[in-house]
Image: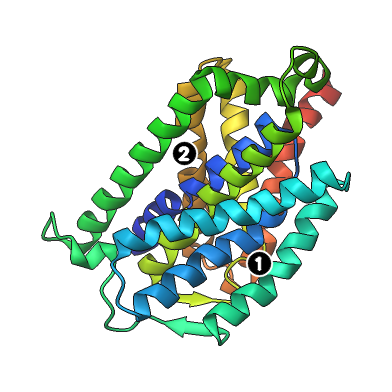
Amino acid sequence: MSFYLTALLQGLCFSGIALGIYISMKIFNIPDITTDGSYTLGGVVTAVLLTHHVSGYLILPAVIIAGWIAGGMTGLIHTKLKINPLLAGILVMTALYSVNLTVMGRSNLPLVSISSIFTSLTVLADPNQNTGLILLVFVIVITLLIGYLLKTDFGIAMRATGNSESMIRALGVNTERMKIIGLALANALTAVSGYLITQFQGFADMNMGIGIVIVGLGSVIVAETLINWLRITSVWISLILVLAGAIIFQLILALTLSIGVDANLLKLVTAVFVLLIVSLPRLNRVKD
């Protein structure tokens, strides 16, 4: 049972990544690999500031700014230097490895006996329930903000940039600026996930971001499958399904561990699961 509870809480922690991948992949059609580096960056900034006894709530703006800058750099390289977005993301992700190592000063930074947002604020007596409540509030606030943004004129222009860049450019919208802001926002959300998971697991590690883009991508693909099956057009419901996808994805991984699969094979299982989700709609079309 502890596997599933932990998976549920991790799913809530990874909601920022899921929303970030949703923005970069589904709104802008940009495969952004910066995610691996910005996720670790959020965790590193959080861990370092916590060890200097800065309040977890004051750390959050610093994490958002750090992720925003990382994503903005990818956007600038892609739009101003006309470099393929995939390569731009790889370049920034590679650079962030050195940045993260320099900031943290070591490969692993434990947070033993250091207060986090989950321990400094006690609403419920049970630690797991208290953590779940705090994470739920975070997720609700983030979802409301992103949902509101996507419904504004600016958000509609962002969505139009991904759907038909030439058309929206003809209407006078600066699509390059939209891409930069979109990637910055996506990586700020990803950094928030690093902020949450670092305090949840009690340490930051240089390798915590390796392959994390697959987690976000798997969450979005699960959500996209549900959106297509249910024929959802509402932005709000789509965001909720993205969050549900993050939780479902983690629960499936927990099920994999609970039935005895070696933890060393978890990344392999993750990749295979994402492959299956991606392949199923195409297999159905082939049969038809």
Residue displayed at 44% across by 77% down:
48
Q: Which residue is mark 1?
A: 210
Percent position of residue 29, x then y: 74, 34
Q: Give the amino acid at mark 2.
A: Leu
Q: What residue is pinned by disc 2? A: 243
- The residue depicted at 73 percent of the width and 38 percent of the height is 278
Q: Which residue shows up at 35% across the image and 80% down it?
A: 52
Q: Nearer the viewer, residue 252 or 37?
A: 37
Location of the N terminus (image quadrant): bottom left
- Mark 1 vs 2, N-terminal side: 1
The answer to whether residue 32 is visible is no
177 over 153 or under it: above or below? below
| Three-letter code for the amino acid on which mark 1 is drawn | Ile
Q: Is residue 85 left or right of residue 3?
A: right
* Vertical position of residue 107 compared to residue 270: above or below: below
**Residue 159 vertical placement versus 214 (above, below):** above
- Marks 1/2 in contact by CB < 8 Å: the verdict is no
User: Which quadrant: the C terminus?
Assistant: top right
When asked about the image quadrant of residue 271, the answer is bottom right
Q: Identify the coloring.
A: rainbow
